[in-house]
Image: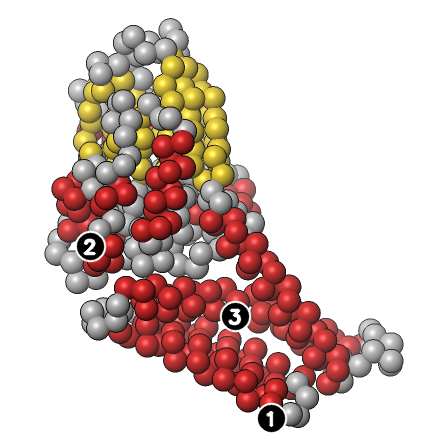
Amino acid sequence: MRVFLNAIFVQIFLSAYIYWRGWQGLPDKKYIKIPYASVYIIELMIYFIGFFMSSTGLLPFDALHDFAWIGTSWMVFAIYMTSLLLVYDLFKYIDRKKKIFPLSFDLRAKKTRLVYFCSSLLLVCSVMAYGNYRFRHPVVTEKNLTVEKEAGGIENLKIVVATDIHAGYLIDKSVVSMYVDKIMEQKPDLILLVGDIIDYDIRSLYEQQMETEFHRLKAPYGVYASTGNHEYIELGESKDEKILWLSEKANLNVLRDTTVMIDNAFYLVGREDDQCKTRKPLSELMQNVDKRYPVIVMNHEPHRLEEEEEAGADIALYGHTHNGQFFPNNVLMATSSMIYNTGIIPYDMKPKFMYELPFGYKKKGETHVYVSSGLGLAGPQYRIGTISEIVVLNVNFKK
């Protein structure tokens, strides 16, 4: 319901405002205004056809992919265009009251409106084009970590971490194939997928035979996954169908509140997402862990970093936040993190979007913490002010 209401707000109210402001500046020529109006009408039809038909099974995959891409892209476009046009209206209002501009510069003139509208349109389209490029060209973030423990006979371990792949209609098989290529290029010793591997529904994965891409992930010490909140979104699927697909079809080692010892050298703990009603505390999962060995924890949502620290984890890996995904969300996240870290807001009173660490690395006690910006995206395929990333941890073990 929340997604539907957001769509209604963007597709009707914001689009109507943008349409009206553009209409006011356009010349009174039918050959200009009719195509202009047609763009808005066609986009609105495409969005709502895709929205209401996506769960019926009547539309082929390619159509759903294109409809979803257009609808989510328009959402970003509408938000940015509305923001710029509101700035114009604000200055116009101030000028009417205070006369801050010279008389020769009339913000109410049709030509001025048209120039500003076209300039805003060009700016937004350019920013979105760059944002889509950033999404389609993930960066490799490398961190060198030292864990002051022996790990059997292992002195160095290259761990490749990918979070928030969101495989589905938008992050389709071609994109996932690019992700897999990028991961395997790093020549990992261990691959960890930390939640939100699947997007909203499972049907698109069956239609694309997406499991064949995950089968290409190989590493000497294995490929492991933990659950994210999207693995618990059920849109017509049976209970835990997404998680079973990951383990049975994609052949991933899904750790659900599970601790494993790998090669008699180090422990790997995979925590259930916060959405799991039977999620166990980390202290219970690590009751039988010999902490003389290194301990790595996968935990999708970075809400309580002190839990991994207090339990004695050496490395704690998170995702979920996307670092806000696009501006200004990333700035809001960074600002809210600064406020939260002052200690004036108790944990049980903080909003869900407020994190101690929304993105990046932090040493918390003896625990190396990394919150990834994520590899894929939920919804619009744009990285504006943020990055899509694969994280490579070069871990050195020594006593």
The residue depicted at 47 percent of the width and 42 percent of the height is 138
CA gap between label 3 and label 1 equals 24 Å
- The C terminus - image quarter: top left
- Kindly identify which numbered label has been placed on residue 206: 2
x and y percent of residue 40 in the render? 49, 80
The residue depicted at 25 percent of the width and 54 percent of the height is 208
Residue 1 lies in what quarter of the image? bottom left
Task: Tell me the mark number nearer the camera, choosing from 3 and 2.
Answer: 2
301 lies above or below 110: above
Any part of residue 355 in sight = no
Pick whichever of labels 3 and 2 is earlier in the sequence. Answer: 3
- What type is the residue that disc 1 sits on? Lys
> Can you identify the residue that label 1 sits on?
30
Specify whether 223 is left or right of 6. left
**In-front residue for pair 296/154:** 154
- Kindly identify which numbered label has been placed on residue 78: 3
